[in-house]
């Protein structure tokens, strides 16, 4: 092999190695930023990783929201009507958050089985259900449309109770 051809071969091999290294480092850096969606059934079954950021979603179970009067701490239960997962959150909840509505929480699953939420994302209108939640309900054998109707009914009842309490 001639010297010039050998030199070109080393340059090409060096470039391939640098590209492979750059791709490997990029994938390694992005690995920690991936947060996968898990339904309560999957979390209870042990499919969700512990102490790693995940997204968990479902419906806020009616009667499960408790607020600490001394702080912004809130605990509530997210359900897919098969299994329930307890969520603890410290902060201001979205205006649209209420019992019987679809939510997605971003947080870390604790070894005790509850989720410490960093963010709570609520639906944006009464017909909306997060796609992941709808898919999880369908996989569990439930029709999301049934729960949209139920969520709207619960929402109307809770609004009526709030209005009655304010009067």
Image (tube, helix red, strand yellow):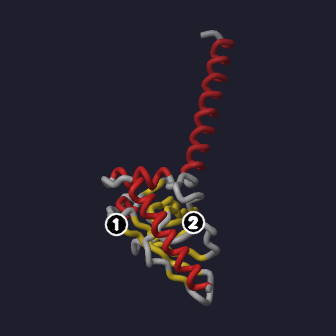
Residue 110 is at least partly visible in this image: no
Identify the mark at residue 2; answer none if there is no mark. Answer: none
The residue located at (45%, 58%) in the rendering is: 148
Number of numbered discs: 2
Check disc 1 and report its element: helix, strand or loop.
loop
Identify which residue is drawn at 47% across, 55% down.
37
| Residue 83 circle label | 1
The residue that label 2 is drawn on is 120
Where is residue 27? Give x, y as percent: 57, 44
Would you call the spot at circle 1 few (<14 residues within 10 Å), some (14-19), or many (20 or more)? some
Q: Position of residue 70 (x, y in %)?
A: 61, 89
**Is residue 3 or residue 35 the one in the foreground?**
35
Image quarter (top left, top right, bottom left or bottom right) of the C terminus: bottom right
Label 2 element class: strand
Q: x and y percent of residue 77 in the render?
A: 44, 72
For the residue pair 25 and 128, the one nearer the viewer reads as: 128
Residue at 64% across / 74% down in the picture?
A: 92
In the foreground, 150 or 163: 163
**The N terminus is located in which quarter?**
top right
Instruction: Check disc 2: other Cα within 10 Å, few if <14, some if 14-19, many if 20+.
Output: many
Residue 107 place in picture, x, y as percent: 53, 65
For residue 62, which quarter of the picture? bottom left
Can the viewer see residue 165? yes
Q: Residue furthest top?
A: 2
């Amino acid at each position: 092999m001639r010297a010039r051809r050998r030199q070109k071969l080393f340059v090409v091999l060096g470039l391939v190695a640098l590209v492979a290294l750059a791709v490997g480092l990029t994938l390694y850096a992005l690995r920690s930023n991936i947060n996968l969606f898990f339904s309560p059934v999957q979390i209870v079954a042990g499919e969700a990783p512990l102490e790693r950021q995940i997204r968990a979603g479902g419906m806020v179970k009616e009667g499960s929201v408790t607020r600490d009067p001394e702080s912004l701490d809130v605990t509530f239960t997210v359900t897919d009507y098969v299994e329930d997962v307890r969520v603890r959150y410290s902060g201001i909840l979205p205006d649209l958050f209420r019992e019987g509505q679809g939510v997605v929480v971003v947080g870390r699953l604790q070894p005790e089985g509850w989720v410490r939420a960093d963010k709570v994302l609520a639906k944006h209108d009464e017909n909306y259900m997060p796609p992941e939640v709808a898919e999880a309900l369908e996989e569990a054998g439930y029709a999301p449309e049934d729960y949209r109707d139920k969520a709207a009914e619960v929402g109307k009842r809770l609004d009526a109770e709030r209005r009655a309490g304010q009067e």
